[in-house]
């Protein structure tokens, strides 16, 4: 059984839209209430420590479990939210569950149990900036022909027919666990989390391995086949966005300092501008989905680079183009789709010299300028496009990794391609980045 999510756009009536916004506001109210209690408790304990009170005599620490938050909320909801009966109990549980997860992530990050970037302490959710979202786990949750049935909200019309989900529900291979509503990009969406048994899939070419070199001018250069050009959706929409942004700036917008409300003409112009941003994001996601699906369903092994996207975004000349390409989203989609289709993704080391290495003889250049778009090998004379050469070197990593797994499972027998000038610069017992070493006939490692 696999957890899947089916996401559909909703077409609610004005009354249903207000009701869904109320459920999201109720979830936000419960989240902020619980976070306020936690912060007050932590501040009280910190203040007591400054007076020299021992830890065993401090104010008892609050329990951060969902059960404890829900129990305390039920005792205080009449005073905190007298209107609580207007919305489903799942909305308050959704907000408290989000708080529990946020506190858990913060604690695990402090203790080194969570990988990735450091997670900060949760912050209060703002009505204007927070994402309007609410999850339903109990009650009437159904997906019909053209409607989604949600607790306390009723039947909400869908923008499209849920063909795949209805087929899986009809044959009994799927079961809806929960539904999440979300207001995003000016529209309401519903996401059905489904537990589904999927057939075992295999890639179309089970013995094929390719390397993918991501770039800005060319979105993806594949070791075999033509490159995938970068659509540059945001760059194409810049002129239209500039025109609409000027129109918005000429009209009376909101001002929180003076309490000035936005005019109707400003609101209409802002909606038009936001619609262009939303369309660009949808086009980018659609293009990446099609590319990653094709790669994961066709090839058994896909090798990509571990790009320093954060460092690339710090370059003000490249940040906009890097963000428009969506490198991080490409890798995220490729990894989960490869698991679904039975293929695998190998991530090359960040310092692996894929662009500096010759894909023909294995010679490594000491320096390669970014302006050099053609790779010229000084050893064998190979001339090739720079990105194509890097993609072939990434594909060679997949072949080497498969060979190492079949021999001893640790990679100690993997063959290394080393030229004479590279071997002279390395000390005995070291290996080129991204490769392993093999013993020579004389008993020394090269």
Image: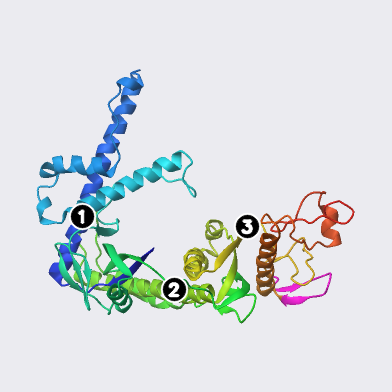
Q: CA distance from mark 1 to mark 3?
A: 43 Å
Is residue 236 or residue 435 the one in the foreground? 435
Q: Which residue is mark 1?
A: 91
Dominant SS in magenta: loop
Q: Earlier in the sequence, mark 1 or mark 3?
A: 1
Residue 306 % position (x, y): 58, 60
Residue 378 is inside the magenta segment:
yes
**Given this view, does label 1 or label 3 mark the residue nearer the observer?**
1
Bounds of the magenta segment: 372-384
Is 345 located above or below residue 113 in the figure? Answer: below
Question: Which residue is label 2 attached to?
Answer: 284
Instruction: Say what secondary structure mark 2 lies in.
Output: helix
Tell me the residue that label 3 is attached to: 350
Give the camera-side residue of 222 and 90.
Answer: 90
Q: Real-space Cα distance between discs 3 and 2?
A: 25 Å
Local crowd size for mark 2, using a 10 Å CA cut-off: few (<14), some (14–19), many (≥20): many
Identify the residue shown where x is 54% and y is 59%.
309
Between marks 1 and 2 in the image, the one whose residue lies nearer the viewer: 1
Residue 351 occupies quadrant = bottom right
In the figure, 111 relative to 252: above or below? Answer: above
């Amino acid at each position: 059984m696999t957890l899947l999510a089916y996401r559909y756009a909703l077409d609610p009536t004005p009354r249903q839209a207000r009701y869904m916004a109320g459920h999201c506001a109720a979830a936000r109210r419960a989240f902020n209430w619980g976070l306020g209690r936690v912060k007050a408790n932590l501040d009280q304990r910190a203040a007591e420590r400054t007076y020299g009170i021992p830890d065993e005599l401090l104010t008892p620490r609050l329990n951060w479990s969902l059960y404890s938050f829900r129990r305390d909320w039920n005792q205080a909801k009449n005073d905190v939210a007298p209107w609580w009966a207007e919305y489903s109990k799942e909305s308050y549980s959704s907000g408290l569950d989000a708080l529990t997860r946020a506190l858990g992530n913060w604690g695990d990050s402090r203790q080194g149990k969570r990988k990735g970037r450091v997670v900060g302490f949760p912050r209060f959710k703002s009505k204007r900036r927070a994402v309007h979202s609410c999850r339903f786990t109990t009650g009437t949750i159904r997906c019909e022909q053209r409607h989604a049935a949600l607790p306390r909200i009723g039947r909400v019309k869908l923008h499209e027919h849920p063909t795949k989900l209805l087929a899986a529900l009809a044959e009994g291979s799927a079961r809806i666990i929960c539904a999440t509503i979300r207001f995003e990009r000016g529209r309401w969406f519903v996401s059905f989390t489904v537990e589904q048994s999927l057939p075992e899939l295999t890639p179309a070419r089970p013995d094929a391995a390719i390397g993918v070199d991501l770039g800005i001018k060319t979105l993806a250069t594949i070791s075999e086949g033509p490159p995938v050009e970068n659509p540059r959706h945001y760059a194409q929409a810049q002129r239209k966005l500039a025109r609409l942004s000027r129109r918005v700036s000429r009209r009376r917008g909101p001002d929180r300092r003076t309490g000035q409300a936005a005019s109707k003409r400003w609101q209409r112009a802002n909606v038009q501008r936001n619609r262009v941003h939303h369309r660009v994001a949808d086009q980018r996601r659609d293009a990446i989905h099609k590319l990653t699906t094709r790669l994961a369903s066709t090839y058994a092994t896909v090798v990509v680079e571990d790009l320093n996207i954060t460092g690339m975004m710090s370059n003000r000349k490249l940040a906009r183009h890097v963000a428009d390409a969506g490198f991080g989203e490409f890798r995220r989609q490729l990894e989960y789709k490869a698991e679904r289709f039975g293929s695998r993704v190998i991530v090359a080391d960040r310092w692996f010299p894929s662009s500096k290495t010759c894909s023909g003889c294995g010679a490594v250049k000491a320096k390669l300028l970014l302006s050099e778009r053609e790779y010229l090998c000084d050893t064998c004379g190979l001339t090739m496009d720079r990105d194509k050469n890097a993609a072939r070197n990434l594909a060679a990593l997949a072949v080497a990794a498969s060979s190492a797994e079949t021999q001893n499972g640790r990679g100690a027998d993997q063959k290394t391609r080393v030229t004479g000038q590279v071997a002279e610069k390395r000390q005995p017992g070291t290996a080129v980045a991204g490769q392993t070493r093999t013993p020579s006939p004389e008993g020394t490692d090269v």
